[in-house]
Image (cartoon, rainbow, N blue to C red):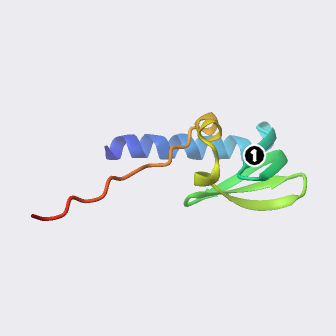
C-alpha cells in the first residue's frame, strides 16, 4: 500500500513539474463555482494546488475538483473508512 502511495506521489510531482515548466497550460479548470482560465500548475502543497491563471494566482483544493478533473490530473481523494468501534 505504501508503494502505491509513493508511486502516486511521484506521478503527481512529475505532472506538477511538467506543468510548472510551461509545457502544460490548461485552457480551463472548474473547481466548484470558480472557473480558472489559462492555468499552469505551480506546485502541490498538501491537498491544494497552487496555480497561476489569467486572473493571478490561487490555491485550489484538490477535493473541490469534480471526479473527472481529478482523474484528468491523476489525483485521487482517498476515503478512509472509520475505525470499527471496540466491542
Numbered-mark total: 1
Quadrant, the C terminus: bottom left
- Residue 42 x, y percent position in the rendering: 72, 53
Point out the residue furthest to the bottom here: 86
Instruction: Please tell me in which quadrant of the rendered image residue 25 appears.
Output: top right
Q: Nearer the viewer, residue 76 or 23?
A: 76
What is the x, y in percent for residue 35?
81, 49
The quadrant of the picture occupied by the N terminus is top left
Q: Is 35 displayed left or right of 74 in the figure? A: right
> Residue at 62% of width from left, 38% of height from top?
73
Q: Pick out the residue farthest to the left.
A: 87
Residue at 87%, 60% in the rendered image: 56
Q: What's the residue at 38%, 40% (across, down)?
A: 4
- Examine the image and state in which quarter residue 15 appears: top right
- Residue 44's x, y, as percent? 62, 55
The relative height of residue 12 versus residue 68 in the rendered view (above or below) is: below
User: Residue at the spot x=33%, y=47% of the render?
Assistant: 2
Disc 1 crowd rating (10 Å Cα; few below 14, some 14-19, many 20+) is: few
Q: Dot 1: what SS?
A: strand
- Name the one closer to the observer, 37 or 12: 37
Q: In the orientation shown, which residue stands out farthest toward the front?
A: 87
Residue assigned mark 1? 30
Occupied quadrant, residue 74: top right
Residue closest to the eye, 76 or 12? 76
Amino acid at each position: 500500500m505504501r508503494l502505491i502511495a509513493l508511486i502516486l506521489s511521484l506521478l503527481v510531482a512529475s505532472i506538477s513539474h511538467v506543468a510548472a515548466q510551461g509545457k502544460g497550460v490548461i485552457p480551463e479548470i472548474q473547481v466548484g463555482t470558480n472557473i480558472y482560465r489559462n492555468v499552469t500548475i505551480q506546485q502541490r502543497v498538501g491537498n491544494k494546488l497552487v496555480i497561476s491563471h489569467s486572473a493571478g494566482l490561487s490555491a485550489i483544493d484538490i477535493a473541490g475538483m469534480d471526479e473527472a478533473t481529478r482523474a484528468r490530473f491523476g489525483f485521487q481523494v482517498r476515503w478512509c473508512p472509520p475505525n470499527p468501534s471496540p466491542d
